[in-house]
Image (spheres, rainbow, N blue to C red):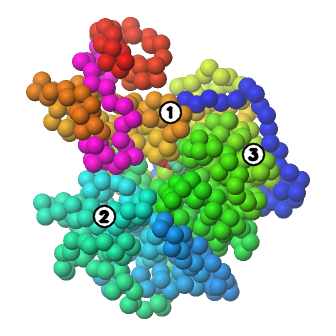
Amino acid sequence: MTETNADNLDTYPPSAEFAAAANAHASLYERADTDHEGFWAEQAQRLHWHEPWSRVLDWDDAPFARWFVGGKLNVAYNCVDRHVLDGHGDQVAIHWEGEPGDSRDITYAELLAEVSRAANYLTELGLVAGDRVAIYMPMVPEAIVAMLASARLGLTHSVVFAGFSPTALRQRVDDAAAKLIITTDGQWRRGTAAPLKTAVDEAVAADGGAASVEHVLVVRRTGIEVPWTAGRDLWWDETVGQASAEHEAEAFDAEHPLFILYTSGTTGKPKGILHTSGGYLTQTSYTHNYVFDHKPGSDVYWCTADIGWVTGHSYIVYGPLSNRATQVVYEGTPNFPDEHRHWQIIEKYGVSIYYTAPTLVRTFMKWGREIPEAHKLSSLRLLGSVGEPINPEAWRWYREVIGGNKTPIVDTWWQTETGSIMISPLPGVTAAKPGAAMRPLPGISAKVVDEEGKPVELGETEANGYLVLDKPWPSMLRGIWGDPERYRDTYWARYGMRGWYFAGDGAKLDKDGDLWVLGRVDDVMNVSGHRISTAEVESALVGHSGVAEAAVVGATDATTGQGIVAFVILTAEAKDTGDDLVAELAAEVSREISPIARPREIHVVPELPKTRSGKIMRRLLRDVAEGRELGDTSTLVDPNVFEAIRARKA
Ligand code: WT7
């Protein structure tokens, strides 16, 4: 849970100048309230439909929704071809900035040619609509081309963050039974070329793993040497690069699966969140237009996310491209070669809309204001935040130091599951409060309720409020890949017949009725805006031969939001070698999952606090990890275990 200022409600109304030119108007809320489906039907007109729909929403088989029933469209056509046909082929779609300093501008016409080549070659490989393609790539233009080419052919992509381990990649490839993996030889990380294709080889090893994979398509990025399996492996430049740049897009059903994206849940097994085409593109396009006040042809937009996460899918690829954005795509880290990098990029391209995560804002604060102050950032006219609650102090710093005391800030709440932004201020309309996500967007309906489903009182600060979404929305997940039961149980069972989607976040409403998201209420941690389950890290730890039992909690962290703190019991055979063992365990977690899951602290303890029914009391471990007085220990089998845990931590 984060610091909020719900009792100290300073507000930042939009300037008259901003409001006058804004895409959004207050009347949008009214329009959506009076006719929910009619409103979404209007928004869907933002897209080109090859065939119209016959029904806006089919919720008869709830919680499985169908939007724009019977409609047909091609997602890639909407993101690329349409703009070229409308005479904007020469507009830059992507200002790509490589980490080592190389760069490339790609116009919509060039993007169309590249996507067409890739679509032609994927067809030549025998892939047909409905097949799954895994994309395991750094932030290179070909990653976006690969996503769009898949969409164009009705292939369902599954992007796996290139920081994930071979084990994590294999798990995802197996679950989706992907036939093709698209990757790069290596990736640039702070000036060094790190191998990536080798991780694919490890995932697709001869021991039966990832048996569905027929081919591995490799983009040359770093030029490092790669192991090669003849017949299976193919170079992108020798194949896609040689294919025809003409390709006609075919229309697919509005509910055709567009992508699967894996995210952490409360168990060790990641959930394959399924998104489809028409509703997803409608809402990403709608939200990108209004929440970012995006003006095609004049704005330069930059979302700093990675395509490995949903933010990259919705606000680098589908939302912006469907709205004919000119955007920056940056390959590297914010501090390579030094901490000026983001500000230099903003200056170089005249970025006007900048969308990032609170953890990065806090990192910028730590680096010092003199760094951004050395740059001309006056092109910025709107700032966004996503991934975790933004604390008021960071919000104000962001607005003052980066936004020159004038830009609206949109604090956007949403999830992999929601597909698009759900709760956010509307720039030009909302008087934003630092730290509050404010109101559900027009067309979206949310409630904050208690355990029983009773709405919490306005201004009630002590209540444990849960955020629920009480109406279906176009970009909602259509399920968990291959696991309809888990879909029902995780999101829809909590409030039974009421048909509310349980988001897993705690929230409250201030006295004005504005909404504050407080953080996860389940066993999911949020580290630098990355969602990691405690169970996944625990299972990686017990995978080490020296660990008998492990319990993991997310502890408040000033920069990353939460930090991972692990408590482990060693096996009788294992020798506690102190720091060496702890370092080895941390490395094991990095290797098994990803460096982003590496615990901040690992404590070797003699026992874990358990209830009589054998449940680990995470709440108490969180108290220990955050150095707080212990909460109620009366249900513990042996309250003394804490003395030992505290002793080891010190
Ligand atoms: C979880 C979803 C949404 C794209 C990035 C993360 C937290 C996200 C906010 C916000 C407070 C936020 C929630 C949510 N979250 N945005 N503006 N304020 N919390 O997507 O990995 O699916 O994580 O991120 O806890 O449930 P994700």
Say whether marks 3 and 1 touch (CB < 8 Å): no
Residue behind mark 3: 400
* Element marked by disc 2: strand
Q: Secondary structure at mark 1?
A: strand
Stretch of the chain drawn in magenta: 587-616
**Is the residue 15 above or below the residue 642 in the image?**
below
Q: Quadrant of the C terminus?
A: top left
Tell whether 345 sits left or right of 579. Answer: right
- Counting residues from the N terminus, which is met first, the one under dot 3 or under dot 1? 3
Q: Is residue 405 left or right of residue 64?
A: right
Q: Amino acid at mark 1?
A: Asp
Q: Is residue 363 left or right of residue 509?
A: left
Amino acid carrying label 2: it is Pro
Where residue 331 sits: x, y (%)? Answer: 49, 64
User: In the rendered view, would you say 343 is above or below 439?
Assistant: below
Percent x, y for residue 360?
56, 47
> Mark 3: few, some, or many residues within 10 Å (few <14, many ≥20)?
few
- How crowded pointer 2 is (Cα within 10 Å; few <14, some 14-19, many 20+) is rated as some
**Res. 267 in view:** no
Q: Residue at x 70, y 55 (%)?
A: 374
